[in-house]
Image (cartoon, rainbow, N blue to C red):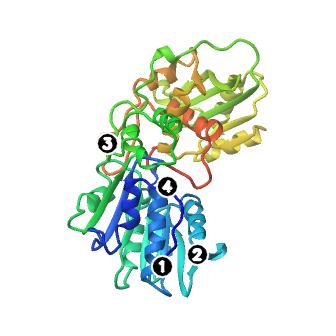
Amino acid sequence: MFPAVRLQFSDRQKQVLGWWSRGSPHRDRDAIVCDGAVRSGKTLCLGLSFFLWSMSRFRGQQFALCGKTTESVRRNLLASVLPVLGGLGFQWEEQRGRNRLTVRYGRVENTYFLFGGMDEGSAALIQGITLAVVLLDEVALMPRSFVEQACARCSVTGAKFWFSCNPAGPGHWFYREWICKAEERNLLHLRFRMEDNPTLSPETRQRYERTFQGAFYRRFILGEWTAADGLVYDFFDEGMVQPVPQGPARRWILSCDYGTVNPTSMGLWGEYGGVWYRVAEYYYDARQARRQQTDQEYAQRLAELAGGRAIEAVVVDPSAASFLETLRRAGWNVRKADNEVLSGIRRTADALKNGRIVICEPCQDAIREFGSYCWDLHSGDQDRVRKEDDHAMDEIRYFVATVVSPAERGASFYAGYVERPR
């Protein structure tokens, strides 16, 4: 039905492109899941296959393209798929304000709505609509209520479900309910490795392999659904600790994890030659000291840590509303920290391993916490860190995620949930 287009596809990608075709042994499957390594080419081939199938099998129908956010659908899926469709002779028109995409090929026209499955409230966004088919990209990052509501909207004869994701832990609900029940659900499960993306150079693959460690290496490089256990930063040791650099820093920034009953941790960061050094810290445990400090007292401790330096900004836990206001009134330039836990851990590990941040010798409480910061082995279907000895860890993560390696808007490798009592 469609003209040829010059693209290079791996054998695994070709399997996805043709799984629904007349000659495929999988054409009678009701769903497909493509999971595995990052940058393995699964999103492009799944999205392209989805559009080719839906445009060849349906006319005048409504479909849903779902991601963690509507912007992630545009960035991860449409940005790579639509140019290929254009090369095949398809035409499309997007109404961004309505999150609606109309696709045409000859006399065939279908409508594709974009939805974001950010949280539990997202399920209400998709209620009431009748869909022919749904594609869920990054499905492991979406709440179960949203995914099940999206699938429930597909009532047209011949509907199939299309999923893609990077692996999470083996207790994740999607892994247990869909992948482990693949035969029961009549589902085709295809696991991708980086080698399945023919456009990825060996140098790029090696760079990604260096980025991850521990369970995240097994998930995002090897493509395994595996549990996070042991130390969070299991590669960190005191051999990585360095003396405070000599001379003036180019920039100074403070970071803070604020607690009333729990410890408060503050770090002083200086930039030397493009590398951020945590040169000093203030750490106060109210339980151990048997005395809580006020917001004004903590603001004074922050000023003492700054030591008269020209501080560019103070990065603070966004939930510390009263302390944030105290600092603003004192004249500090305050930045609310990016507090997404698992993506922040990944970025912090990357920054430590690649030498973009360095912990200096005076930061003994941070060094102590690196040696005890562990995954919670009883966290159920989500990755959580054990809420002990984590205050300097949180503060360092805030700094990295907000200053050193900020995420793109709406982008995330991980979805996590960590509770903290104040």
Q: Which secondary structure, mark 2?
A: loop
Q: Tell me the kind of residue under disc 4.
A: Gln
Q: Where is residue 99 in the image (x, y as percent from the top left)?
A: 60, 73
Q: Which comes sooner in the sequence, label 2 or label 3?
A: 2
Asked whether residue 120 appears in the rendered view, the answer is: no
Q: Position of residue 414 (x, y in %)?
A: 46, 48
Q: Where is residue 179 in the image (x, y as percent from the top left)?
A: 28, 58
Q: Which comes sooner in the sequence, label 1 or label 3?
A: 1
Q: Which of marks 1 and 3 is in front?
A: 1
Residue at image x 64%, y 41%?
Answer: 323
Q: Do the CB atoms of the residues marked 4 and 3 lie less than 8 Å apart? A: no
Residue at image x 65%, y 26%?
Answer: 276
Distance Cα–Cα, label 1 vs label 3: 39 Å
Q: Tell me the kind of residue under disc 3.
A: Ala
Residue at image x 38%, y 73%?
Answer: 151
Q: Do the CB atoms of the residues marked 1 and 2 lie less than 8 Å apart? A: yes
Which disc is residue 55 wearing? 1
| Disc 3 target residue | 227
| Disc 4 target residue | 8
> Badge 1: how crowded within 10 Å, few (<14), some, or many (20+)?
many
Distance Cα–Cα, label 4 vs label 3: 34 Å
Q: Which secondary structure, mark 3?
A: loop
Q: Tell me the kind of residue under disc 2.
A: Phe
| Disc 2 target residue | 90
- Foreground residue, 288 or 2? 2
Q: Which comes sooner in the sequence, label 4 or label 2?
A: 4
Residue at image x 38%, y 85%?
Answer: 156
Distance Cα–Cα, label 4 vs label 2: 19 Å
Q: Nearer the viewer, mark 1 or mark 4?
A: 4
